Image (cartoon, coloured by chain):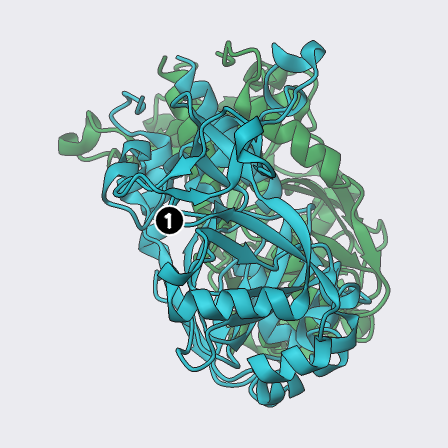
Chain colours: A cyan, B green
Amino acid sequence: MINNNPQDPLAELITTYNELNSSVIEALHEEPSPLEFMRFVARNTPFVIRGGASNWKATQTWSPAYLSEHLGDEPVNVAVTPLGYVLSNADSPTLYEDGTLVFAKPWEESQPFTEFLNYIIQQEKDPSSLQGEVHYAQTQNDNLRDEYASLFNHVQPDISFARIALQQKSPDAINLWIGNSQSTTALHKDNYENIYVQILGKKHFVLLPPHCRPCVNEKLLRPASYKRVVNDDDDPSPLLLSETTGHVLSKLKLELDKIEEASESGHGENSGLVPFATWDPEDDGPSGDYATPYSKLAQPVKVTLEPGDMLYLPAMWYHKVSQSCNPEEGICVAVNYWYDMEFAGPLYPFSAFVRSVYESQQHK
Amino acid sequence: MINNNPQDPLAELITTYNELNSSVIEALHEEPSPLEFMRFVARNTPFVIRGGASNWKATQTWSPAYLSEHLGDEPVNVAVTPLGYVLSNADSPTLYEDGTLVFAKPWEESQPFTEFLNYIIQQEKDPSSLQGEVHYAQTQNDNLRDEYASLFNHVQPDISFARIALQQKSPDAINLWIGNSQSTTALHKDNYENIYVQILGKKHFVLLPPHCRPCVNEKLLRPASYKRVVNDDDDPSPLLLSETTGHVLSKLKLELDKIEEASESGHGENSGLVPFATWDPEDDGPSGDYATPYSKLAQPVKVTLEPGDMLYLPAMWYHKVSQSCNPEEGICVAVNYWYDMEFAGPLYPFSAFVRSVYESQQHK
């Protein structure tokens, strides 16, 4: 419920910020100096560097053929989710069979790289030709210095302006993302300063500043995980069906995670429940159900990264990410660098404060 | 009244900030680079540079004799307030004769510089020898590039690390402060990034971050001004008397400013009333009356500037300032540089939000 005060402090906060900040992202055409970067960090404001990584070896040489040849049949971790059933794929709010919203985690499996790559390319060229699954290499566990280490010297080992400004020897994680236009990431935020580099295809970001917490309708969701069903006949539980044709779309089944009984009655961090945004800032349709009275006040920053572009995504900003492929390539590839954020100063306590004001208002 | 929620968001904000930030100020021993400075700006965190201005001409040459010789009988603007009657002098909350707290502004008059200087030195050496008035040159109107322009080339024209980091051609104001140990400045905040440089004597700062708004008990006060009473016999209104002896302490009289009738019933910015902190973070005694339930949560940062020290006082931080003199000099002299603050980003909307949450809570 919206605050009944003539001046609602949360509404005032969002509108004051909007008046003082542009929702059009600033575009640079070369890397900032560490000092110039630090000014953006101080303002907790995103920017894009058009062509900032256009001379990287990755940007200049990677293609499906090159990657296939380079990685061959090396096993890679692939996140698997059903196609066309949810707005987002892995790690996203999803309707469970009992009609409640749960936090759905992907099925993860190891696939030979070439098999993974061929699947996503073929799906991109002809979605109907394949089993209804989205495959996305997106482990976010520093995979470019681990699983894909043989590709690591094709990118910069760090982003020098960020390393110097933030005084960090090395990024906390460097992640490689390989998927196609079916791969999207639901609105969420991370406690990291984030530099995103597009290598192949385009990434479409929708960004909201940290104080937009009252707009995103964060809920505590039961965690659930997709499981690959091995033998249909032995498993009587319903499979995912196409809403239009009723055909079996996937052999994936969503199962609730076991939550320890002791904590089941708990709340918040100890309950095993996952706090997650449920509002989709791009959806005026059915998921508008998840809008709060504050959602309409949000002024998202939208930016599309082309190959070679770099994005500074400031700490604690909400981001929803979707992508589109060059038809000749059929894949989207990106790399991101996570640097530890500063917990001293106003940003972190401020964001926690907005959250607790909003929550205390909900409980009235 | 304090919020009755089990988790009071305002109390949580103050304690979370305290857990993540030290109340001991960081001390540097040389000027930071613009990038190092920008890291402090980003954290909105003060620091002191011990001896940062020790090689300035002002620090090396100024003394009462030097200033007296240099400025002679040039007229200077002096703020005049009664001695020993209020905790702070100019621009401070003061009890009016009707028992209400008002915002007292000083009587301002022009005095020949040498006369002004001799007064404050003699008072410092023997307070009882003089009429009960505090004299303070503190106009805060860029007086070092105007009234005291002949001294301007004794200090740096700007603070280079701040000019470069904040991308400003020149400070918005450079102010000279000359007083003695009777001159104090009540707790308040400014919308400026502030660099303070101590030249003679010591300055004692008590600092509170911007989100401590709920601790300082800001009230809307009627503005009042001290007037010098020319002829006692013609003016029947009460003079300021010593609380102990009953003697006339000063020929100054506090008069309420005229507020236009149309706005008298108004509130806030248009009412003519002055919003001002009434809590004194150093006073455990009677002025403890002005503590709020949040005041005890505040962890003030305390720092004393010696001659040649520089303080970075971040934008919107509350500061109370008192001073003490070297007995051989009998005066305190400082210079401060105001740079425009950044209104984009989280700091300004955040501070306004804390204020409106606190106020909306008061109205319940």
Total number of numbered labels?
A: 1
Residue A323 sits above or below residue B118 on the image? below
Give the letter of the chain under mark 1.
A
Residue A213 sits above or below residue B285 on the image? below
Q: Residue B118: image x %, image y %?
A: 68, 55
Mark 1 burial class by Cα count in 10 Å: few <14, some 14-19, many 20+: some
Residue A31 appears in the rendering: no
The image quarter containing residue B64 is bottom right
Q: Nearer the viewer, residue A121 or A212?
A: A121
Q: Nearer the viewer, residue B139 or B347?
A: B347
Q: Residue A184: image x %, image y %?
A: 46, 55
Residue A244 appears in the rendering: yes
| Residue that appears at 66% across and 20% down | A259
| Residue that appears at 39% across and 12% down | A364
Residue ID for mark 1: A84
As shown in the figure, which amino acid type bears the numbered disc 1?
A: Gly
Q: Is residue A245 toward the left or the right of residue B133 in the image?
A: left
Q: Residue B11: image x %, image y %?
A: 59, 23
| Residue that appears at 49% across and 70% down | A121
Q: Residue A356: image x %, image y %?
A: 51, 26
Q: Secondary structure at mark 1?
A: loop
Residue ranking furthest to the left: B262
| Residue that appears at 19% across and 25% down | B265
Q: Is residue A130 toward the left or the right of residue A229 in the image?
A: left
Q: Is residue A232 toward the left or the right of residue B49 in the image?
A: left
Q: Nearer the viewer, residue A4 or B1?
A: A4
Q: Which image quarter holds the N terminus of chain A?
A: top left
